[in-house]
Amino acid sequence: MLIPAVAAFAPLLTRAAGRWIAIPVVIFEILLGIVLGPAVLGWIRTDAFIELIADFGLAMLFFLAGQEIDFEAIRGRPIWRAVAGWAVAVPLGLAIGWLLDPDAGAVFIGIALTSTALGALLPILRDAGQLRTPFGISVLAIGAAGEFLPLIAISLFLSGRGALHEALLLVGFSVVTGVAIWRASRGDGRRLHGVIRSTLHTSGQFAIRLVILVLLALVGLSIVLDLDMLLGAFAAGVIARLLLVGAPEPDRRAIEVKLDGIGFGVFIPVFFIYTGVTFDLDSLVSDAGTLALLPLFAVLLILVRGVPSALFVPRGMPVRQRAATGLMAATGLPIIVAVTTIGVEGGDMDSGTASALVGAGLLSLMVYPLTALALDRGSSRRPRQESNLRPRD
């Protein structure tokens, strides 16, 4: 009962703190998980059932991130700029990872430093009314690259198998997913939309059942192929969005609200609370050198991920908005958790280093988006500088 209690209590804390500062609800979920978990009070203990629900919550987070991406808005220059920024970040991250850990941990650190928490940024951008602005579209493209491309890197380099073998499996998964995306994007789907509308407000709920089927099918396929399950979850979100293209706006919005309710109302909070419960606080604070890595990694997220992303924003974007974009890009947590978990379980990464990375991701989520939104609000007071920006520039 404690986990659902934390999930219900965290939004109340967010609302109360909102009188002074807008703190994302995931911050309270993680912090309460740390306090109530083995690191402090020891009231919440993990087991296989909680871990399963948390894994599905993580899959739902990446599914909703994939579903939220408007490829019509980010296609062209925005997505290519985002990919270029990530491509610059990769060698920087790997080089820094090698300096900090010349052994196998270098790849884990490098990939973690190139990630962006798109799933966590989406509700922040949506609540701030920035999701469809030029600034929001830039962040959306950067987040898509910073979430999808690290998943590819995880599947290729962190599986423990040969890169060629992994690449062949990845190609097979891509073919199956590509065919599904192609089928979903064909035609106007009038017959499908008719079934959706007829069951949308009944116990049938065909649309929700179909979306969950697509999610579990692709997650299951990625697990069978021994790829990262988040790759399948992200692809399922993209397919779900395409399936709803052409549906009446009220129906599409109703389905999105229902899926948000399932994800952010049930499963995703369990993942963030579980992250706090399993956070190795002792390894972090027991050694001064390990503790010093936390602020270092927080700064490195900006240098490795934020700065390259800020350099590839559209021409003419105000300096304050460039800085805001870089801070948004440097916000990372879910992939950091996934990467460090793989590293610790495989014995390739020290638990203290992993905790410092997760702590830096948590710190970035607490500080960077709020600072970025404040900078963006400041730049919005100069409309002449923004007038040259277009969503696809």
Image (cartoon, rainbow, N blue to C red):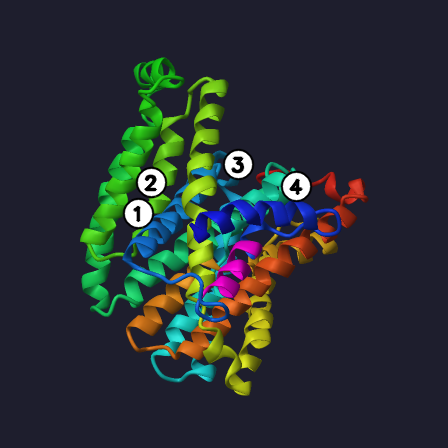
Picture layout, residue 234 above or below residue 336:
above
The amino acid type, in three-letter code, at marker 3 is Ala
Picture layout, residue 293 above or below residue 76:
below
Please tell me how crowded label 1 is: few (under 14), some (14-19), or many (20+) other residues with Cα within 10 Å. many
Picture layout, residue 81 above or below residue 187:
below
Q: For mark 1, give the secondary structure.
A: helix
Query: Could you tell me which residue is drawn at 69 percent across and 51 percent down?
Result: 17
Horizontal and vertical percent position of residue 277: 44, 63
Q: For mark 4, give the secondary structure.
A: loop
In front here: 387 or 371?
Answer: 371
Q: How many numbered markers are drawn?
A: 4
Mark 2 and mark 4: Cα distance apart in space: 26 Å
Horizontal and vertical percent position of residue 198: 35, 13
* Residue at image mark 1: 232
Mark 3 and mark 2: Cα distance apart in space: 19 Å
Q: For mark 2, give the secondary structure.
A: helix
Labelled disc at residue 73? 3
Of pointers 2 and 4, the one earlier in the residue sequence: 4
Mark 4 and mark 1: Cα distance apart in space: 29 Å
Displayed quadrant of residue 279: bottom left
The amino acid type, in three-letter code, at marker 2 is Ala
Q: What range is drawn magenta here?
A: 28-37
Of pointers 4 and 3, the one earlier in the residue sequence: 3
